[in-house]
Image (cartoon, rainbow, N blue to C red):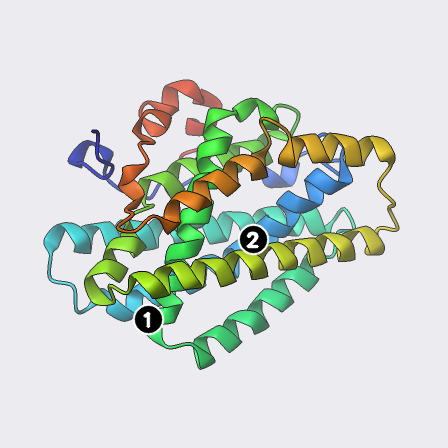
């Protein structure tokens, strides 16, 4: 079986520059559907502080790692996540201009992370990162398998999500390997995933609700129908994600058990307009 992070799949932070400020964007930019759009807005709002937290949780163990390959992978992971956060900040400020209360998401995340860092030990912080990294890699897999779901999304937004998806798959094992080596508590890993998914989805739903209230938008029946298909239909993004997250609970699971190499091999040829944003 192909293994991720072979030397031909090095974790490479790419400097990207997306044309977010010249992007033409409707208030509900994805499929003109408020429920689908606010889902991605909530995620985007959570990314910058969330990804800084991931870096923080891995950095805690960085100095005690001696394996050269792992040291290089951690560096790649930190470089990628730091850049994701910065790009999503630019996107978030564009989304704010549409009257979407992104500040609310950002402030809420900042206080949540402050609480996590002060009340969780480093092991649990890392376990949370491991859980979230698996969630994002599963979401990334769906997006890269079904890039057409973003066909009518503004270019810079779509390009950012595709690039982010590629790098999430590239570095999906890093926090996991650090956790395995430094903590190695299978029960904690699985327990924290349950808590992480419950809090993540309740937060996303809360942010979506606040966005709809602030914009005084009541989703139509047509939007509900389209969104339920989009999220939970036969080829729904959250349905696929549910099955992806389920794999995490297998005893002895490792992220490289899920072969996603084909999705990121030659991604530049599959998405040339995304690759063209690298500076
Ligand atoms: Fe990321
Ligand atoms: Fe990540």
- Taking the spot 32% from the left edge, 36% from the top edge, the residue there is 258
Residue 21 percent location from the top left of the image: 63, 41
Q: Nearer the viewer, residue 85 or 256?
A: 256
Residue 164 percent location from the top left of the image: 45, 40
- The residue carrying mark 2 is 89
- Visible in this render: residue 82? no
* Secondary structure at numbered mark 2: helix
Give the position of the C terminus as an image quadrant.
top left
Report the residue that reaches farthest toward the top.
Answer: 269
Q: How many marks are shown on the rendered structure?
A: 2
Q: Nearer the viewer, residue 111 or 82?
A: 111
- Taking the spot 38% from the left edge, 70% from the top edge, the residue there is 124
Quadrant of residue 34 within the rendered picture: top right
Quadrant of residue 6 within the rendered picture: top left
Question: Which mark is on residue 21?
Answer: none
Q: Earlier in the sequence, mark 1 or mark 2?
A: 2
| Vertical arrangement, residue 194 with respect to residue 156, above or below | below
- Taking the spot 36% from the left edge, 39% from the top edge, the residue there is 169
- The residue carrying mark 1 is 123
Image side of residue 13 versus residue 46, left or right: left
């Amino acid at each position: 079986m192909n293994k991720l992070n072979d030397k031909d799949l090095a974790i490479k932070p790419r400097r990207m520059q997306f044309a977010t400020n010249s992007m033409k964007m409707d208030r509900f930019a994805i499929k003109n559907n408020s429920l689908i759009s606010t889902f991605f807005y909530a995620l985007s709002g959570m990314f910058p502080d969330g990804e800084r937290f991931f870096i923080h949780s891995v950095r805690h163990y960085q100095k005690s790692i001696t394996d050269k390959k792992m040291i290089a992978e951690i560096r790649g992971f930190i470089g990628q996540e730091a850049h994701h956060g910065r790009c999503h900040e630019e996107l978030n400020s564009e989304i704010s201009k549409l009257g979407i209360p992104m500040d609310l998401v950002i402030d809420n995340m900042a206080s949540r992370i402050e609480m996590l860092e002060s009340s969780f030990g480093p092991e649990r912080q890392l376990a949370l990162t491991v859980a979230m990294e698996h969630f994002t890699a599963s979401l990334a897999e769906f997006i890269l398998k079904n890039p057409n779901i973003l066909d009518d999304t503004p270019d810079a937004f779509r390009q950012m999500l595709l690039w982010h998806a590629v790098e999430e798959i590239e570095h999906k094992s890093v926090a996991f390997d650090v956790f395995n080596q430094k903590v190695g508590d299978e029960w904690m890993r699985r327990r924290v995933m349950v808590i992480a998914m419950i809090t993540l989805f309740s937060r996303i739903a809360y942010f979506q609700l606040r966005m709809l209230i602030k914009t005084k938008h009541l989703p139509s029946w047509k939007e509900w129908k389209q969104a339920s298909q989009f999220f939970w239909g036969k080829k729904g993004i959250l349905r696929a994600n549910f099955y992806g997250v389920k794999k995490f609970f297998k005893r002895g699971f490792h992220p490289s058990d899920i072969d996603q190499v084909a999705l990121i091999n030659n991604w530049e040829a599959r998405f040339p307009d995304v690759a063209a944003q690298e500076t």
